[in-house]
């Protein structure tokens, strides 16, 4: 444990009904709620029960801070709104990894390094042929990113900081290439190899939408929108996929395998899969005249409103506020302001924001509600939405994994359980069952 935390003097005293008692240190971070350090409880042979981790901090981190009630999100102390307005994605990546914003020379060197890793081994391209053309691109992502583990045997020593750095650069460089290849494969188009004259985001759009037959000129409005989506999704402290990456990494698994586990966790509709689910929901509603009925179905608990609600944000998700603005910009740029689906989305937003059912439960539109609309307006198909989230979140997973691997007190993650199964019983012969 780090020195600044062990010096805290405050304690919480826990007294059990059998009279045993223990003093537990109260830790204070630089921001946010105090945390009771329950390490010592094991000495009393007692555990805590906290399913879904409502009240459990799983690690000490310096990367990202969220205050869900106040609607705040900071990367390394910088508010997300400032980064979304003033920064670009690779600068945010540097910040998350390193802890500080780069100066001009550091930034240029970082961009050079990431860009030098955008190609994938030619053998990796063969993996795609093993997938059905109609495979979900997230299935392809889990498989192909995990498969990167088999290409770098010479630099997979997780205890070597240089190897960890190299893996970080490789992941940052190659995940967009792998994602765009998943899109191309799904649609039967030839792969477009990266062009390093483009920026990170331009290059991704190029690999997605260019064809060998035509010149490709990136549209700056679309580039800006995708840059924002990547920045807003870059990290979000200990969410389900990041916690999965950390848990996998705690066993000493290699970083590519850890990222594959993060991608798998992200895929679920309660997490990163929500952007795709939100757009499918809009398509299912179909017409603005059906919004009220659909909302009634949500209140009758037939289904959830996808793209609404968040475990931590019980006020507006600050990422959603930025994305909402981008959403209107992109719809205008694409001439889609009067599009049926987008008008329907705006009606749903209006009803939900004013309905007591949603107000009482603090259910606001989250970032995925708006990012689904933006991505759709950019011409990206719904089954690629979560893939785009994964491309943006790779830096968060990598930064959190690196932070954990560099910590001096790293241990394998191993939750306990409250067992409620059978007590001991003897094996009966078949004739006695
Ligand atoms: N639609 C309708 N009701 C909801 C919704 C929703 N989207 N979300 C929560 N509720 C209700 C829920 O029924 C419960 O009501 P009651 O107290 O009457 O039983 C109450 O709100 C609390 O729900 P919960 O499941 O305890 O809340 P949670 O904090 O565990 O769940 C969530 C958070 C994100 C999983 C949930 O809000 C949800 O399923 N949302 C839809 C999926 C979604 O958009 N996910 C993306 C999150 S943002 C991107 C990311 O970070 O991954």
Image (spheres, rainbow, N blue to C red):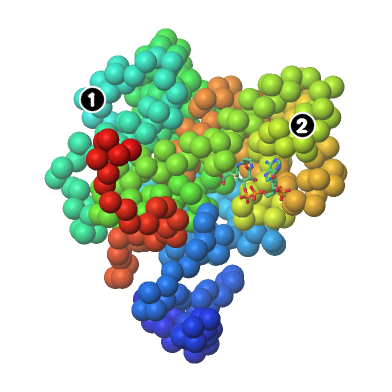
> Is residue 137 left or right of 109 when viewed as pictured?
right
Name the spot of residue 305 as percent of width and height, x first: 70, 36
Using residue 170 as the reference point, say whether residue 160 is left or right of it: left
Contact, mark 1 vs mark 2 (Cβ under 8 Å)? no
Quarter location, residue 104: bottom left
Task: Categorize mark 1 by other alpha carbons within 10 Å: few (<14), some (14-19), many (20+).
Answer: few
Q: Is residue 138 above or below residue 283?
A: below
Q: Would residue 58 be seen by someone viewing this image from the given angle? A: yes
Pick the front one: 144 or 190: 144
Q: Position of residue 56 (x, y in %)?
A: 51, 64
Residue 229 vertical position relative to residue 54 in the rendered view, above or below: above
Above or below 131: residue 295 = below
Q: In the figure, residue 330 lies in which quadrant?
A: top right
Disc 1 vs disc 2: which is toward the camera? 2
Tell me the residue at 50%/27% (across/down): 384
Q: Which residue is mark 2?
A: 297
Q: Can residue 103 be seen?
A: no
In x, y percent, where is residue 135? 42, 20
For residue 397, the mark is none
Q: Residue furthest front?
A: 431
Dot 2 lies on which element?
helix
Q: Quadrant of ligand 1?
A: top right
Residue that appears at 67% across and 50% down: 317
Give the labeled residue for mark 1.
122
Residue 316 lies, in percent from the top left, at 71, 51
Q: Nearer the viewer, residue 54 or 108?
A: 54
Quadrant location of the N terminus in the rendered image: bottom left
Which structural element holds mark 1?
helix
């Amino acid at each position: 444990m780090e020195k600044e935390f062990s010096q805290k003097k405050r304690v919480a005293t826990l007294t059990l009904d059998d009279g045993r008692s223990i003093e537990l240190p109260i830790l204070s971070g630089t921001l946010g709620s105090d945390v009771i350090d329950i390490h010592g409880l094991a000495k009393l042979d007692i555990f805590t029960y906290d399913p879904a981790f409502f009240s459990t901090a799983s690690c000490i981190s310096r990367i990202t801070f969220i205050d869900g009630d106040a609607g705040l999100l900071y990367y390394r102390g910088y508010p997300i709104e400032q980064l979304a307005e003033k920064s670009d994605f690779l600068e945010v990546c540097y910040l998350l990894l390193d802890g500080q914003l780069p100066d001009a020379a550091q930034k240029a060197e970082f961009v050079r390094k990431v860009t030098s890793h955008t190609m994938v081994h030619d053998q990796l391209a063969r993996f795609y042929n093993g997938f059905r053309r109609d495979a979900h691109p997230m299935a392809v992502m889990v498989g192909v990113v995990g498969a990167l583990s088999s290409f770098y045997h010479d630099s997979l020593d997780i205890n070597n900081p240089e190897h960890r750095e190299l893996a970080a650069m490789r992941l940052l460089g190659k995940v967009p290439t792998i994602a765009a290849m998943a899109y191309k494969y799904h649609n039967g188009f030839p792969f477009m190899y990266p062009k390093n004259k483009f920026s990170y985001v331009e290059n991704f759009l190029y690999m997605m939408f260019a064809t060998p037959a035509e010149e490709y000129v990136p549209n700056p409005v679309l580039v800006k929108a995708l840059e924002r989506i990547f920045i807003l999704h870059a990290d979000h402290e200990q969410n389900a996929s990041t916690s999965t990456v950390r848990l996998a990494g705690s066993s000493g698994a290699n970083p590519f395998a850890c990222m594959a586990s993060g991608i798998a966790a992200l895929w679920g509709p309660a997490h990163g899969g929500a952007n795709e689910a939100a757009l499918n929901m809009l398509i299912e509603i179909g017409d603005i005249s059906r919004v009220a009925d659909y909302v009634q179905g949500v209140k009758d608990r037939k289904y959830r409103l996808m793209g609404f609600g968040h475990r931590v944000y019980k006020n507006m998700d600050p990422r959603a506020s930025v994305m909402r603005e981008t959403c209107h910009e992109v719809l205008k740029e694409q001439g889609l302001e009067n599009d049926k689906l987008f008008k329907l989305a705006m009606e749903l937003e209006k009803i939900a924001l004013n309905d007591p059912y949603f107000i009482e439960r603090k259910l606001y539109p989250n970032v995925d509600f708006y990012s689904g609309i933006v991505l759709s307006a950019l011409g990206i198909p719904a089954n690629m939405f979560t893939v785009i989230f994964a491309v943006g979140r790779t830096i968060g997973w990598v930064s959190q994994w690196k932070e954990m691997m560099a910590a001096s007190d790293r241990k394998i993650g191993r939750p306990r359980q409250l067992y409620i199964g059978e007590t001991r019983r003897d094996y009966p012969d078949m004739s006695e069952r």
